[in-house]
Image (tube, grey):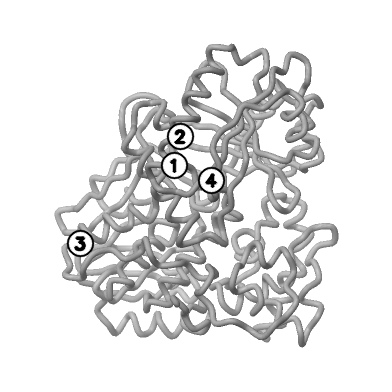
Amino acid sequence: MNTLAATSTSLNASRRARELAAAADDVADVLVIGLGVTGAGVALDAASRGLKVTAIDAQDLAFGTSRWSSKLVHGGLRYLASGQVDVAYESAVERGVLMARTAPHLIRAMPFVMPLTPLVSRRDAALAAVGLHAGNALRAAARTPRKVLPGPLRLSRAETMGMAPGLREDGLRGALLSWDGQLCDDARLVTAIARTAAGHGARILTRCRAIEVTGEGVRVRDELTGEVKDLRARKVVNAAGVWAGGLVPGIELRPSRGTHLVLDGASLGGLRAGLHLPIPGSLNRFALVLPQDDGRVYVGLTDEPVEEIPDVPAATESDIGFLLDLLGTVMDATVRRSDVLGAFAGLRPLLSAEGRTADISRRHAVLTSAEGVVTVVGGKLTTYRRMAQDAVDALGLAAGPSRTAGIPLVGAPGTVSPAAPVRVPLRLARRYGAEAPLMAALAQDDPSLLEPVLPGRPYLAVEWAWALAHEGALDAADLLDRRTRIGLAAADGAAALPAAESLIKTMTGD
């Protein structure tokens, strides 16, 4: 059994302070800059090989691109269409690793319907069907069981309307049905990876900003106190995503912005599946309509080049209008700008190349500077584990091969010692896996923790209490925007803020 003691994986303010002080007096084997999905993955890969690891981030876990994804672990179908067979196969393999072995509690199979409307010609429909069957062949080649991901089907018009009642019926010829992996939450994945790394001995230090990077370590500023410290290491890995080029010279990136809308599920007629919507004028680009387990629906995504790299990217009105117009081509009811509850945008850390950002390869790259700093960039959320493996391999340290394909993340079956029998709310079971009984047990002394933090929304107070005690949350923004995603709808975030601040005060005594 791959059981880790709950205390060994717990991240909190006291552990951060203790380990930051220890890191300043030590020499790590590996120092990782960035605690998005790739940096957390590097920390886990290196620590699980027995290396001494310190991992830092200027902000919180999953503060950057990793929390702005479509919440999908996908099999790389679009890369097949552009001839990137190796990238597509790698995606399919890594999807299978996550769904079948390392994170089955965070990812589940999601059906997708591609409606065959008058805008989709019979030729294009036939090509799409061939692509879906090729994707299924990739699934089989990656040895992902069919019980984990079923194969594609053709749906009748009636079957299509049953899965997507809000579609416009006029001219609808049915649909193509396929399956992919849906993350309950991308930020939860990053948190689970970071905590698993901590369970293997890695020091996970948020709010530590790298202000000077060399091949022998990093000068950091503690963003909570302003204190500057020198952290020494035998090797340094730059996994700062879109900010990587600002830390190491010679890294040229061409970021692109991907925007999603946040809608109430009722505005789209109560979807029972996601939607693939072909983007006019493109054979291999699709917009996605993604129902969430909290009753919201995400609609995305765009692919627009950007020049500036802000801490928190903003969705533009042109992106929002584009996605609303696309919805208007298939939905019976008009979705208006006033129906948009929120919008979020992420920046992809693409390697500089010629042509449109939408056409730039999603291959990752591992680059070593003259000073020996290893930078890992490109790629995508699905393949984070392979990116991390390649980065640690490039360090040249004697540590044996990567083990992470067989290491279940915190919360996966068998990773936590069983708790005493307790009634577990479905939301906790679906989002926290094996840790859900431990969370529910917290509420035995305080039943109010199982109450929603916001009337009419599913988020429970115990999720925040758990995040403060075990998941490294330090302030209200961590609770609202990353440990839960209440903040994706601005009005919800504002309404829940007082409750978050009150709970922090209660638990910390401040």
Q: CA distance from mark 1 to mark 3?
A: 31 Å
Q: Residue 149 bears which disc, if any?
A: 4
Is 92 or 226 nearer to us in this picture? 92
**Side of 439 where 382 appears, left or right:** left
In this rendering, the answer to whether 41 lies above or below 265 is below
In this rendering, the answer to whether 50 lies above or below 81 is below
Find out whether the residues at labels 1 and 2 contact each other: C-beta distance under 8 Å. yes
- Report helix, strand or loop for mark 4: loop
**Side of 270 where 213 appears, left or right:** left
Q: Residue 139 bears which disc, if any?
A: 1
Quadrant for residue 40, please give it.
bottom left
Q: CA distance from mark 3 to mark 2?
A: 34 Å
Quadrant for residue 28, please give it.
bottom left
Residue 420 lies, in percent from the top left, at 67, 86
- Report helix, strand or loop for mark 3: loop
- Report helix, strand or loop for mark 2: helix
Residue at 81% from the left image edge and 40% from the top image edge: 266
- Report helix, strand or loop for mark 1: helix
Residue position for label 2: 135
Find out whether the residues at labels 4 and 1 contact each other: C-beta distance under 8 Å. yes
Q: CA distance from mark 2 to mark 4?
A: 11 Å
**Side of 391 where 65 appears, left or right:** right
Residue type marked 2: Gly
Query: Label 2 crowding class (10 Å Cα cut-off): few <14, some 14-19, many 20+?
Result: many
- Examine the rendering and report whether any part of residue 500 can be seen: yes
Query: Label 3 crowding class (10 Å Cα cut-off): few <14, some 14-19, many 20+?
Result: many
Q: Residue 395 bears which disc, if any?
A: 3
Q: CA distance from mark 4 to mark 1?
A: 8 Å
Which quarter of the image is occupied by the C terminus?
A: bottom right
Mark 3 or mark 1, which is nearer the start of the sequence?
A: 1
In this rendering, the answer to whether 250 lies above or below 185 is above
